[in-house]
Image: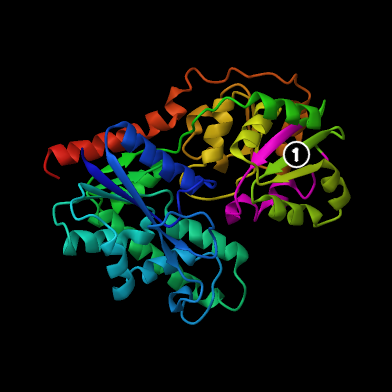
Amino acid sequence: MPNVLILTTYPLVNPRHGGQVRAQNICSQFQAAGWRVLNIAVFEEDSYLEVAPWDVPFPANSPHREFRGKNVMFIGDLQTSKFVRDETNQALILSRIPADLDVVHVEQPWLWPVAAAYRQQVNSKVLLSYGSQNIEHELKRSILNSLAGSSYKDIIEDIINEIMLLEQSATRGADVVMCVSSSDELVHRKWGARQVVVAPNGVEYRSPDRERLEYWRLKFGATKFLIYVGSAHPPNFTHFNDIVGGSLACFPPDAKLVIVGSVSEHIYRECLKGSFSSVNMSRLELLFELSNADLDAVKAIAHGYFLPIPFGGGTNLKTAEALISEKFIVGTRSAFRGFERYIDSPGVHVFESPAEMHKLVQHVFAQDPRKVKNLDSLKPLTWESCIQPMLAAISGRIGAGR
């Protein structure tokens, strides 16, 4: 039985956000194919409560938390890469990794130094695989430019350059690179990747629990709503007001925009801004974090999905979930990165301005709540189909002696 290690910067105990869900499904697909799977996370200790015993915390008081003496928001992942380069920390991590691995797969570039050190110091025959979820330096530039305070605007380009160098090192050093879209594939090929495979984000369909379904049906009654599920990842909220034109008045008085996940508090703050705050509050329903059973039930009774994604790399996991639901979808063009072939499907409505969004929301709520048969086949959206090219590429490399 072949052995694979999956390295992540987030624990996979009770996956919640998109990165965790993707990594957990990669693990599951390896296991289904007959592999023995180990996951080790090097995680920011102040961000996660549920962890595995072998995961490694990145302490909140570590000197590696600062970038040139400054605490910069949203670069904990980059600073994690510096933490694992530290000789003592790296030795600790390597001591937890078996010496006889066939494959080390690194999700995102942050832990690439660990994989490279393992091949150099422990097992020269191991195959290294790099899973790119975004072109990270481009995504980070968008995030930092939209949020950065004046105290560290002068070092943004230095941060971006460090991230790009790390990405390029992972791309050139890996035997196989996995990315999530054809546009990302072009970047990795330009950087000199040996082999690139597109393995996009997918979805696992779960039937809702009958008891939870009844609970939420009673709670919402006849109220129609669009659902938006998201984490506190900045692209999920930073331009929300710009996208909706500052107003949710396009939602009928008896309809709601339901927000689920840790993005809830951020959307709440966004909707309080401007002269339409009272209208926005009347149209908003914040559910915050839900269990998977409750989330499945709320999705099942939703009238449709709202995908207000302004920018970001890779592909959006929530778009795959919306498509496989066969419900109405109202979303930005950016939300369909990697899913462009579905844009013209019945029930899918893409907007590029607040005025278009307002018209589409009104149009969708005027329709009967029904399933919209918008896809010829849903199978390409499942995790099994999405991850298969990755497994095939790795197995092929091993069979060929890397």
The residue nearer to you, when weighing 42 against 50, is 50
Which quarter of the figure is the C terminus placed in?
Answer: top left
Which span of residues is magenta-colored? 225-249
Q: Say if the magenta span includes residue 95.
A: no
Q: Residue furthest left?
A: 401
The residue nearer to you, when weighing 23 against 38, is 38
Relative horizontal placement of residue 99, taking residue 256 as reference (left or right)? left
Image point (68%, 26%), residue name: 211
Q: In which quarter of the image is residue 308?
A: top right
The residue nearer to you, when weighing 221 against 359, is 221
Kind of residue at badge 1: Leu
Question: Within 10 Å of the Cα at label 1, are there few (<14), some (14-19), or many (20+) other Cα atoms?
Answer: many
Relative horizontal placement of residue 128, taking residue 25 as reference (left or right)? left
Q: Quadrant of residue 169?
A: bottom left
- Residue 76: x, y in percent? 48, 66
- Residue 95: x, y in percent? 26, 63
Q: Say if the magenta span includes residue 246.
A: yes
